[in-house]
Image (cartoon, rainbow, N blue to C red):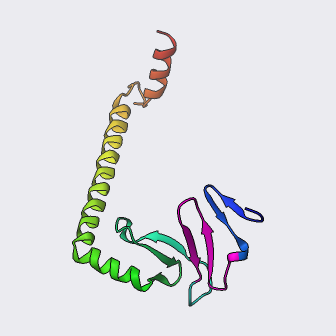
């Protein structure tokens, strides 16, 4: 592509840029980046509720903007229980992260519990581990 800016598999064609949108072509489908109607800045594209499969335009300052077919698809997805399933999946993912963080904290506490007590009750578990590893 002559005079195209390539990012990964996507090639941006400046000659196809219109006042309100920028078209990026990949090997599959063209992708349109549109400008926010309020601030005239290009918007990000994101999967609505992370799991809907509906890609919407999103402005950092002014929120989400829907095309007509996107709104219909989102409403259908919501009526089919998509928001509830998405919320449950997000909750499960956050619970998994919390469990992992608790495990890391417990491991850190266990490692820190190895203490060397002298007259000053110093915690020198790292030094003890290092020396025992070096002088085995």
Q: Classify residue 34 by image quadrant.
A: bottom right
Q: Classify residue 44 by image quadrant.
A: bottom right
Percent of width and height locating residue 79: 23, 77
Towards the viewer: 134 or 17: 17
Left or right, 127 with reference to 110: right
Q: Classify residue 125 by image quadrant.
A: top left
Q: Residue at x 46, y 15 (%)?
A: 132
Compared to 59, does 129 lie above or below?
Answer: above
Compared to 123, does 81 lie above or below?
Answer: below
Which span of residues is magenta-colored? 16-35
Q: Residue at x 45, y 22 (%)?
A: 129
Percent of width and height locating residue 77: 28, 74
Left or right, 26 with reference to 135: right
Is 43 magenta? The answer is: no
Residue sitting at the far right: 3
Is 30 magenta? The answer is: yes
Percent of width and height locating residue 18: 66, 82
Residue sitting at the far top: 136
Towards the viewer: 2 or 83: 2
Q: Residue at x 62, y 55 (%)?
A: 8
The quarter of the rendered structure image containing the N terminus is bottom right
Residue sitting at the far bottom: 38
Compared to 12, does 111 lie above or below?
Answer: above
């Amino acid at each position: 592509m002559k005079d195209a800016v390539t990012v990964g598999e996507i090639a941006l064609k400046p000659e196809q840029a219109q006042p309100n949108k920028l078209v990026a072509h990949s090997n599959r489908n063209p992708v349109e980046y549109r400008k926010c109607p309020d601030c005239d800045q290009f918007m990000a594209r994101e999967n609505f509720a992370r799991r809907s499969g509906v890609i919407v335009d999103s402005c950092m300052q002014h929120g989400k903007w829907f095309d007509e077919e996107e709104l219909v698809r989102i409403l259908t997805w919501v009526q089919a229980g998509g928001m509830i399933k998405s919320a449950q999946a997000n909750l499960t993912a956050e619970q998994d992260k919390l469990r992992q963080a608790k495990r890391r904290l417990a491991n850190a506490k266990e490692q820190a519990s190895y203490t060397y007590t002298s007259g000053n009750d110093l915690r020198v578990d790292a030094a003890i581990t290092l020396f025992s590893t070096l002088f085995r």
